[in-house]
Image (cartoon, helix red, strand yellow):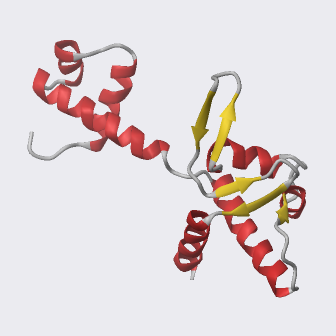
Amino acid sequence: MSDLDPRLARKAERLGRDGLFGKALGEKLGVTTAEANSLLAAGRALAKIDAAALTDSEIQLIRILASLRRAAIARGETRSVETRAVSRLLGKAPGWCAATARKRLFVERYDRLKDRTERGLGFVHISGNGFVWLTAAGWALAHALDERDA
């Protein structure tokens, strides 16, 4: 197999999640067992890459956080942005900003149910008292998004 077909690799990954491996996977895809295993590995790698993509809500949150912080600095304010201000500006429920940031954008948090510290993507830091701000990685992403749209 010289060139990999991404659609076939994604199909192999879906079938692998359903418990189809090796020879049975190859027969289902119409390829040899070795090719099926390669497609499965490639499909898993593609799925991992796809899972890291930011959602529209996450991109929207980063953009609005950056613009609110820039506006606050222009007014001479030094404090961070409040989560409810972000949610209000976007016309969302009061807890939308914090909930969206706590899904994947956060830096680090402790999960009591799992009894361990979890690491997020590291773009946004959320305080316990309703303030939120971008980390250095978050600002880099905000600049990249601004450049992409310019």
From the viewer's perspective, tell me whether residue 64 is left or right of residue 143: right
| Residue 78 position by quadrant | bottom right
Q: Camera-side residue: 111 or 45?
A: 111
Q: Quadrant of residue 58?
A: bottom right
Q: Is residue 26 above or below residue 11?
A: above
The N terminus sits in image quarter? top left
For the point 75% across and 67% down, the residue is 64
Observer-nearest of 59 and 31: 59
Question: Which residue sits at x=34%, y=29%?
Answer: 13
Left or right: residue 80 versus residue 119 is right
Q: Position of residue 123 (x, y in %)?
A: 61, 58
The residue depicted at 11 percent of the width and 26 percent of the height is 34
Q: Quadrant of the C terminus?
A: bottom right
**Could you tell me residue 29's position as x and y percent?**
22, 24
In the shown orientation, is residue 118 left or right of residue 26? right
Hey, which quadrant is residue 119 in on the image? top right
In this rendering, is residue 25 above or below 4?
A: above
